[in-house]
Amino acid sequence: MLVILIIGCAASNYFMSTYGAVIDKNMMTNVFETDSQEAVALITPQLLIWLSLAGIVPALILASIKIKPSRWWYTLLTRLVGVLAGLLIIILVASVFYKDYASLFRNNKGVVKMVTPANYISAISRYSNARWFAGDQSLVKIGEDAKKGPLISQQKKKTVVVFVVGEASRAENYSLNGYIRDTNPEMKKRDVIYFPNASSCGTETAISVPCMFSNMSRKNYDASLARHQEGLLDVMAHAGINLLWRDNDGGCKGACARIPHTDMTQWNLDALCKDKSCWDDAILHRFGNVLDGLQQDSVIVLHLMGSHGPAYYRRYPDKFRTFTPTCDSNQIQDCDRQSLINTYDNTILYTDDIVSRTIDELKAHDDKFNTALVYLSDHGESLGENGIYLHGTPYMLAPSQQTHIPFLFWLSKDYQQNFAINADCLTKKAAAEQVSQDNIFSTLLGMMDIKTSEYQSDMDIFAICRKA
Ligand SMILES: [Zn+2]
């Protein structure tokens, strides 16, 4: 038992001290729902050395200790005395230093989650309770009354909305958001409507993605319900919208479970992929042909690899190595901060190009469809601020870098006209208002003019900007 616990402690200590990770139920969700490609990127020589010195060596020493049999009452008595003495010391210390401890816990809410092995044992048990012992998991249907409204039904052209879901892109590194470096040279040229005050539902993919596609808000989000309840795409399917999910980011975490989806890493695009990880160019592979083939009103979700860490340097082709020197390693905590930021900014530059080219593909099909595009990131990313790297910090402790996300719309002229959208109104709203992933569900239903009892007009970002 101790051998197992010690190795577990070594692993959780490593991730806490190297990346500032907080070990809780959500982190266990990440551990159990990751894929091999994502996990391999975290295996570094440093991790292996840490695991052997802090885990395997002490475990071997422990295992070599011979346990001598003794009388049962003696064993029981010594342990009882040990536990009582321990309790007594705790009470003594607490009575003298109560104030200091109270303020320590009040000011450092995460400190309880740093105690090994309690942190990962409770995290694993809470995760497995929610995941495997949650009772009735039969599918809960929603929005079965969904129908296309008169606006979309009367269009001469079919309507195509592309929803691009990014990965680990943080708003503060977007020039559209005021960042000093020009990381959005292409999107800037394309009349996008950018929302500078947007926040995510979670700080990790496994929470944010199912959350934004669910009819729940961040405050009442229930991950175990989301797992067996229909979401946005199911409601769209009930209304007869044609759907497709193209994935390049390790899966849709349940959001596309009942609609057509394809994993671009399985397409053998050798020029774009290495070790089962593909540049986001893969997501645009024959995308024009996909658009050519559409016969119905459609929503296509593109799930990007974006700025997936820690191996940021592997996310973009050489052409996008604009900011140098770069940190060409997955041991990001060993790189100097500026080179880490340079590498990260190059990933944003590449995403800027991918989203812009998606817009261009839609523009090229303007004669045939009313087209629009939505882009946002699932969550942000920490790049060493206060010793925190990557993401996944519990929401109430999370720094703004992990929750402040880029969020924008591009609407073709015909879409604006045919769906009676006042773009100026939307631009004004963008500058003034706080929006979040909670708005996605009703905004996308509204964009496709879907009538259902699930739709809430006060959550639809476009609602007040639609002309009567
Ligand atoms: Zn993510």
Image: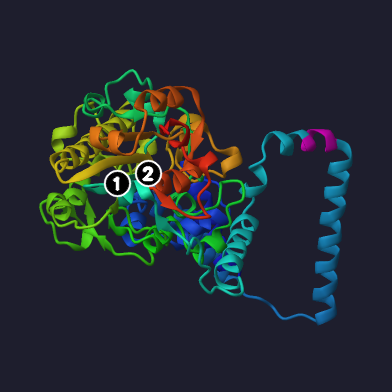
Q: Residue 41 appears at what percent x and percent y? A: 32, 52
Q: Depth-wise, is mark 2 or mark 1 nearer the camera?
A: 2
Q: Mostly what secondary structure, the magenta segment?
A: helix
Residue type, mark 1 in image: Val
Q: Residue 261 appears at what percent x and percent y? A: 29, 62
**Residue 285 seen anywhere in this rendered image of the structure:** no
Q: Which of the pair 290/343 is nearer the observer?
A: 290
Describe residue 160's horizontal placement relative to residue 193 as left or right.
left
Q: Which of the pair 334/154 is nearer the observer?
A: 154
Q: Residue beneath label 1, please?
A: 161
Q: Residue at x 19, y 27 (%)?
A: 322
Answer whether labels 2 and 1 touch (C-beta < 8 Å).
yes
User: How far apart are the two marked residues, 2 and 1, measured between alpha carbons?
Assistant: 8 Å
Q: Which of the pair 82/389 is nearer the observer?
A: 389
Which corner quadrant of the image does residue 338 belong to?
top left
Q: Please give the label number shown on residue 275.
A: none
The N terminus lies in which quarter of the figure?
bottom right
* Residues in magenta, as a range: 97-102
**Secondary structure found at label 1:** strand
Q: Please give the label number shown on residue 447.
A: 2
Q: Which residue is drawn at 24% across and 43% down?
A: 370
